[in-house]
Structure formats: C-alpha cells, structure tokens
C-alpha cells in the first residue's frame, strides 16, 4: 500500500526533526549559489543558526522574477559540470525560469513520482501511457522516470495525435494515463466519435490529471466518460515538476510530501501566514535538492491546508485543489501565459484600438480562449480586409502563446470601459 511506509506514515514529531535536519543541509547547499550567498550575508543567516523551522521565516521570499533575473545559471549551487539536466516552466514570457538538476536530484524526483503513482495503485504490472510533451516541460520526463522506477511498462506517447493515443491505449492495453484534464475530455470525445467506448473497449482504470486548474465536477465527468479513477497531481517546474503533492485513494485533497518540501500558506497581500485552514498562497522550500535549492519560493497558487488526519494513514498534510492564482497567469490547455503577452501582440497592430477582453470558457469538452478587441476608429469595415487581419493576429498570437485563440474584431466603443482597474480577463471555467 505504501512505496516508503516509514517516510509516508512518519510521526509529526519525527517529520519535524527530519525537516529541520534537511533545512540545515539545504541552507548549507544554497550558500554556494551567488544569489543565496548574498541574501544570507544580508540577513546574517547560516545553517548553524537554525534552531527550529520558524527560523526560516526570517528569510525573504524567492520569486519567479528572481529566477528570471538569475537566468540562466545564477541560481546554481553546484558546478555546472555536476548538473545533468535543465528544465523550464511551460510559459513563454521573457526569460524562462530555468531549473537545474544533478543526477541525485533526478533520482529523488523519480522516487517522489513513483511514490505518488504507487499510492494510487499503479504497479509494475501496469501499462502507463504519458500524454505530456517530452521537452522542457516536466510532465513528460518527470512521469517517465517515475513510472520506470516503479517498474510499469511505459508508453512515452507524448502530446497530441489523439487517434494515435487511442490506438496505443487499445493495442498496448494501457491501464493508466497521465493527461491534462482539458485533454482528457477531448480524448474521451474522440473515443466516442470513433465508435469506441473507453469504459468497455479499453483496460484504462487510473489516470493522473494535473498541470492546470480543474474542478471537482470536471474530475467526475472525466471519470465517468473514461470509466476511470482520476487523481489530482500538482507539480511545478521550480519544484522539480509533477509529484510535489498528489491525491491518495481517498481523493480528499493532495498530500504534500513534507520530507521534500516545507510548505507555508501566506496572505499574498500582507505576506503573513494565514490562519490555519484559510486560503492563501502556497510557499515552498525544497528540502533535498542539491543543484538548485529554493528557499521560500512563492508559487502564486492559491490553496489551503485541509484539517484532520487522512484515513489512508499518511501523515503528510493535505492541500485543497487550487482556487486560482495570486498573479494574473492564465493556464490554458496546460500552457502558462500572461495577459501582457497577448496585449503586446495586439498593440503591434495599428489597426487595433487599445481596448480588449480575454474570455476563457469551456466550450463542449474543450477550454477555449476568445479575444475580443476593438478596432481603431481610423480603420476600414471592409470584410475581406478584416478577415485577413484576423488571420494575421491569430497567427502571431499562436506563435507567441503556442495555442490558438479565437479573435473577434469589434467596432470602437463596443467593450465596456472602466474608471478603475479594467477587467481584461474573464475566466468562466468552473473551478470549485
Ligand atoms: P509548470 O512550471 O509549467 O509546470 O507550471 C506550474 C503551474 O501549473 C503551477 O504553479 C500551477 O499554477 C499549475 N498546476 C500544476 N498542477 C496543477 C493542478 N493539479 N491543479 C491546478 N493547477 C496546477
Ligand atoms: Zn490520504
């Protein structure tokens, strides 16, 4: 039932001790990076001054902007020669956030993912198909190495080509999938279009869904459509990738592996801890990473600790499914993007005015983005010119965002204006 019984069911007291010991190691390791060396100097902080976990609160937060400013290798805490892999976040804004890994880091990460998969009943008798991209995005290689460590027969199908995914699922007897939730519903749709019923015509039984926000309703829908149990998986490239927190068979929140991270939940405005059980921003400190330790990293993801013990016997605390973000990052079809990227492209077109509205909604079984943008008043209403313009806007946005939005050009003055903060993004997907 447990991959590492002792660690997964460790008493809180022993977990506190383990965290303390690992925190000291982390601080010792982090001081080798120029970035943390200067912070520790400024705060006169060192591992030998740490008496309890609370001492960590004396240090400042680390942010995505810090990582960007240190691009590419300013956060490295070991020589590059000892690093064996680079990953980065799925977004495309500015400098990507680079994460370096040593061989030991990769080994630990694979163990973390294997632990999650074992927890939801995946075994070496399973056939595990991974529908994540296998590039810099961590959902590909992260699950690959975890599943191999577990001993499952792995199918690194990678993203896209739905009919081919379905052929593999049928021919290889795939029992488990890793898939982003918006693609899971699309996959089910194609099964039914092909005259196949995934509940009867496949061996699918367990899927791991994550990488983007989704509601309990969406999970239930996926479970019904595919005839599977779907488990929520949280990861982010800055914290390795998938496997940071994962649901157990109770499906009552995600156990966050506290031997790998110290988790805090703070108020994103005051930066103070929120009262136990309230929603705030998740902040994480890595506990056994050597190439690139991160201290008090602001994830920007909003969640809360769930009260009570879990009947599964694991003692690591549970966090709730995400409620959103404390910045304006949008996650669509597993891709991270910021409204400013869209604005930058739109504003390049002199034919366009400066008022626009981005709406994200679930259409059928797929999450779609509609961008309504006003034309500048000098511009034509000639239909074919407008069509050409729309096409060019879509092309440029697709290049930037790696996904295809729908564009609607509107006459000047059509969109509501505001004296205060303009609402640029409406996310109509239901998340809770
Ligand atoms: P990336 O670094 O590209 O893997 O993106 C990480 C971000 O994806 C996280 O900070 C979350 O905002 C989002 N994310 C990952 N897993 C989940 C999940 N299970 N539910 C909701 N959002 C998620
Ligand atoms: Zn549990």
Image (cartoon, grey):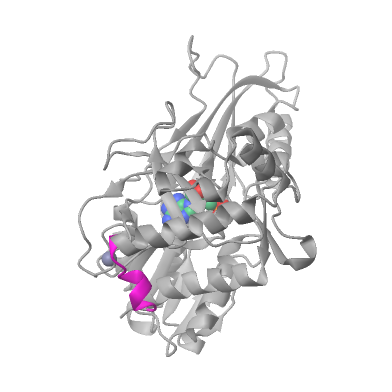
Between residue 227 and residue 211, name the one nearer to us: 211
Q: Is residue 407 magenta?
A: no
Between residue 267 and residue 92, name the one nearer to us: 267
Using the image, determine if residue 274 lies above or below residue 301. Answer: above
- Residue depicted at 39% across the width and 52% down the height: 214
Residue farthest toward the right in the current orientation of the protein: 81
- Residue depicted at 22% across the width and 51% down the height: 307
> x%, y% of residue 78?
72, 59
> x%, y% of residue 248?
31, 67
Region in magenta: 3-12
Q: Quadrant of residue 393?
A: top right
Q: Quadrant of residue 227?
A: bottom left
Image quarter of the C terminus: top left
Residue 244 visible in the current orientation: yes
> x%, y% of residue 375?
65, 21
Between residue 15 and residue 323, name the one nearer to us: 15
Q: Quadrant of residue 67?
A: top right
């Amino acid at each position: 039932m447990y991959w590492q019984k002792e660690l997964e069911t460790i008493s809180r007291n022993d977990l506190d001790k383990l965290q303390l010991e690992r925190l000291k190691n982390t601080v010792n390791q982090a001081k080798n990076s120029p970035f943390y060396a200067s912070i520790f100097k400024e705060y006169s902080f060192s591992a030998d001054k740490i008496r309890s976990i609370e001492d960590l609160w004396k240090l400042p937060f680390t942010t995505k902007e810090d990582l960007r400013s240190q691009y590419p290798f300013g956060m490295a805490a070991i020589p590059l020669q000892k690093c064996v892999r680079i990953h980065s976040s799925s977004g495309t804004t500015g400098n990507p956030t680079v994460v370096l890994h040593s061989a030991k880091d990769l080994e630990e990460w694979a163990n973390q993912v294997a632990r999650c998969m074992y927890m939801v009943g995946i075994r070496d008798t399973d056939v595990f198909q991974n529908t994540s991209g296998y590039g810099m995005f961590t959902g590909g290689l992260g699950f690959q190495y975890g599943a191999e460590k577990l001993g499952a027969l792995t199918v690194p199908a990678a993203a896209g080509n739905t009919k081919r995914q379905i052929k593999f699922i049928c021919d290889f007897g795939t029992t488990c999938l890793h898939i982003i939730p918006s693609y899971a519903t699309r996959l089910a749709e194609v099964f039914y279009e092909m005259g196949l019923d995934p509940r009867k015509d496949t061996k699918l039984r367990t899927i791991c869904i994550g990488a983007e926000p989704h509601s309990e309703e969406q999970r239930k829908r996926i479970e019904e459509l595919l005839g599977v149990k779907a488990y929520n998986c949280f990861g982010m490239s800055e914290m390795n990738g998938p496997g940071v927190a994962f649901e157990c068979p109770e499906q009552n929140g995600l156990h966050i592996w506290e031997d790998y991270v110290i988790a805090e939940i703070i108020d994103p405005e005051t930066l103070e801890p929120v009262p136990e059980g309230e929603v705030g921003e998740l902040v994480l400190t890595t506990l056994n990473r050597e190439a690139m330790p991160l201290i008090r990293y602001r994830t920007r993801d909003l969640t809360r600790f769930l009260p009570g013990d879990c009947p599964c016997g694991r003692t690591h605390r549970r966090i709730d499914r995400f409620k959103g973000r404390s910045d304006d990052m949008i996650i669509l079809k597993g891709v991270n993007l910021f409204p400013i990227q869209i604005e930058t492209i739109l504003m390049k077109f002199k034919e366009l005015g400066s008022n626009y509205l981005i709406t994200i909604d679930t259409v059928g079984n797929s999450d779609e983005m509609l961008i309504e943008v006003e034309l500048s008043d000098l511009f034509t209403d000639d239909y074919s010119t407008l069509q050409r313009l729309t096409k060019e806007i879509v092309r440029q946005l697709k290049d930037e965002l790696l996904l295809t939005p729908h564009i609607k050009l509107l006459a000047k003055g059509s969109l509501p204006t505001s004296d205060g903060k303009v609402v640029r993004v409406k996310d109509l997907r239901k998340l809770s």
